[in-house]
Image (tube, rainbow, N blue to C red):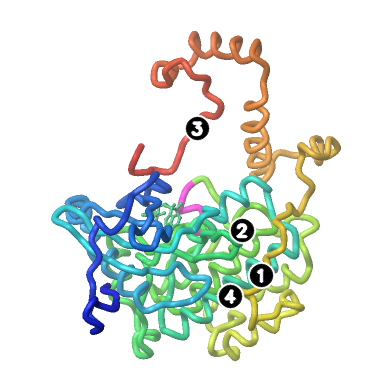
Amino acid sequence: MSQIQEGGDGNKKPVKKTPNDFMFGKVIGEGSYSTVYLAKEVETGTEFAIKVLEKRHIMREKKSQYVMREKEVLMKMNHPFIIRLYFTFQDTDRLYFVLNYAERGELLDYLHKLSSFDVPCSQWYAAEIVHALEYMHSLNFIHRDLKPENILLNTDMHILITDFGSAKILNKEEEIKPEEEHHTQRRKNSFVGTAQYVSPEVLTSKQVCSSSDLWALGCIIYQLLSGLPPFRGGHEFQIFQKIQKLEYEFPDGFDPLARDLVEKLLVIEPTQRLGCEELGGMEQLKSHPFFEGIDWEHLSEQKPPELLPYLPATKDNPDELWSRPGFDDKRIVELITNNVSDNLSITEDERNKRLEDQKKNNEYHKFVEDNLILKQGLVDKRKVL
Ligand code: ATP
C-alpha cells in the first residue's frame, strides 16, 4: 500500500516505504509463516508492528493466497477494534506488513492468567467483538478464524482483531452457494478455521456465511466466562462430533444472561443464530439483555473495565486452593497456571534439589543448558520451534 504524502515541491505524490524507513526492534511474535517485529518509523518515531514474511517460505508452503487475502481484506478496513495495515512493501526476499502495535498482546494470555473473566469484563469484550464483526460483515468479509488467540489488545486494553489470512470476501450470490474453496479443502481432509470454534455448517454442508462468525462468537463468550471453549476433545474428530451434536454443558454458576445469549448463538441452523440477517441482523444481537448498559456508539472512547477473574484467583484466596472436588479440564488449566507461578518463587535449596533430580531423571535435561524445567508438555507447532 502506498501512502500519499506531501512532496517537497508541494505536489501530492505516492511514496513507497522501504525497510530503511524503519528501525527494527525486538521480536514480538512468531507465526507459522512470519516473524513480527516491534519497529519505529525513522521520520516520525511512531511505533508499529511489522510482520515479515519470507517469500521462499510462503511459496514452498503454498500460502501465497492466504497472504494476498490478508492484505486485500486489511487494506479495505479501518475500524478501532481491527488491526490496521498502514503500509506494505517488499524486497527481494521478504514481504513487509506494517501494522499498528498491539502492545498488550493476546487476549488469550489474560484469559489463561485469570482462568476466566468476570461478567462486566466478558460483557465488555464480547461487545467490542460484536462491534468489529458488525463492521466486517457490513463490508462482506467473514473472518472464519475468530478465537481469543486472534484478538490482540492495544495500550488501552481495547481489542484489535487480527489474522485475516482465512477471511472470505463474500458477495451476495456466493453466500448461498456451496463453497468451492471448502470443497477442495475438505477433500484434503482439512477445513478453514480452528477446530474448537468451527461452525457445524462448515463441517457438514461446506457452506460458509457470516453467521459462522456468530457461532465462533458464542464459543468465545462461553470461554471468556468459563475459561475453556465449549467443545473440547482429545482430537479434532471428537470435537467435530460434539459440535455437530451440539454437545456441551455450562459449568455451575454460569451467568444466566450470558447463558441465554450463548444458547442463541450456538444454534446448528445458521439462519437461526441471533445476529444473522434472517433474524433482524446485528441490532437484534446488540439488544440482547446481556449487553444492557453498553454504549455502542462510544465503546472505543471508553475505558474497558479492569480485567478480573470470574472466580477469585487461588493465590489471593487460600480457600480457593481447595475450591471444589473433581478434576476436569478447567481445573487442569487452573492448576497448571498456578503451578508455573509457584515454581517461580521456590527457594534456592528447593531449586537445586529439583535440578539434581532433573539431571538424573529427565531425558530433556540435555537441551536446557542446566536450567530448571518449570513446565513440560506438548506445545502447538510454532515456526521457531
Ligand atoms: P499462524 O500464522 O501460525 O496462524 P499467527 O497468525 O498468530 O500465526 P502472525 O499474525 O504472524 O501469526 O503473528 C504472530 C504473533 O505475533 C501473534 O501470535 C501475536 O502474538 C504477535 N503479533 C502479530 N501481530 C501483532 C501486532 N500487530 N502487535 C503485536 N503483536 C502482534
- Assess whether residue 206 is covered by the magenta stretch: no
**In the rendered structure, are the residues bearing label 4 and label 3 in contact, judged by CB atoms less than 8 Å apart?**
no
Circle 3: residue type: Gly
Q: Earlier in the sequence, mark 4 or mark 3?
A: 4
- 137 vs 92: above or below: below
Q: Earlier in the sequence, mark 1 or mark 2?
A: 2
- Nearest the viewer among 290 and 95 is 95
Circle 1: residue type: Val
- Quadrant containing the N terminus is bottom left
Q: Which residue is mark 4?
A: 130
**In the rendered structure, are the residues bearing label 1 and label 2 in contact, judged by CB atoms less than 8 Å apart?**
yes
Label 2: state its secondary structure.
loop
Tell me residue 317's x, y (percent).
Answer: 83, 39
Q: Earlier in the sequence, mark 2 or mark 4?
A: 4
Residue occupying image coordinates x 23% and y 84%: 11
Circle 2: residue type: Pro
On the rendered structure, is 357 left or right of 31?
A: right
- Nearest the viewer among 194 and 238 is 194
Label 4: state its secondary structure.
helix
Counting the numbered discs, the total is: 4
Quarter of image, res 382? top left
Mark identifier at residue 377: 3
Tell me residue 90's x, y (percent).
Answer: 20, 61
The boundaries of the magenta stretch are 235-241
- State the CA–CA distance, disc 1 to disc 4: 13 Å
